[in-house]
Amino acid sequence: MTLKQKINFFKSEAKRFIAIHGLINYAVFFDSDENPECRASCEMPDSNRQLTIGYNETWLRQTDDCDEISKTAYHEVIELLLAKLRLMASEKESYYSNVMIDEEIHRIIRLLENIYFDKIKKIS
């Protein structure tokens, strides 16, 4: 696949997973995110229900594994599912640190990936 095809595949998978999970009350945008530590990202700067799912073009150029691209899109959709929780927990008055919040959210995401991803990827 070309880079453009991989980007389009990533976007279409993310949109499909958004629909499967009923996350239709967000304005979702896609953009390149060249953070070398991430394959992709999900940014919701405030509670206005607008967010950006980013994809790392460098990583996409290096992979030809459609399952990994799909799983990365799924991961970011689960980030979306938990975005409001992250926003609420990261308020100044929060008892927990941002690192602790990130660790717990990623524990939940990995659990959902390991339990549901293979089943959900088959849904068209």
Image (spheres, grey):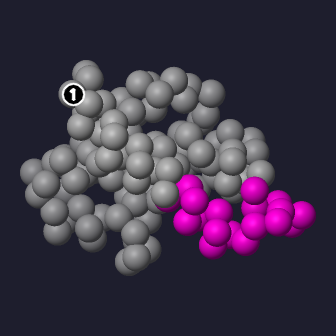
Measuring 49% from the left and 58% from the top, which residue is drawn there? 106
Quarter location, residue 74? top left
28 left or right, relative to 32? right
The front one of 121 and 100 is: 100
Would residue 105 be counted in the magenta stretch? yes
Query: Which residues fall within the magenta stretch?
Result: 89-106
Measuring 62% from the left and 27% from the top, which residue is drawn there? 25
Measuring 69% from the left and 45% from the top, which residue is drawn there? 84
Figure quadrant of the C terminus: top left
Q: Which residue is mark 1?
A: 122
**Three-letter amino acid code at disc 1?**
Lys
The front one of 111 and 17 is: 111
Quarter location, residue 123? top left
Residue 102 screen position, x and y as percent:
59, 64
- Residue at the bottom extreme, as displayed: 36
Residue 42 screen position, x and y as percent:
52, 54
Residue 88 screen position, x and y as percent:
77, 51
Would residue 61 be counted in the magenta stretch? no
Residue 118 screen position, x and y as percent:
24, 37
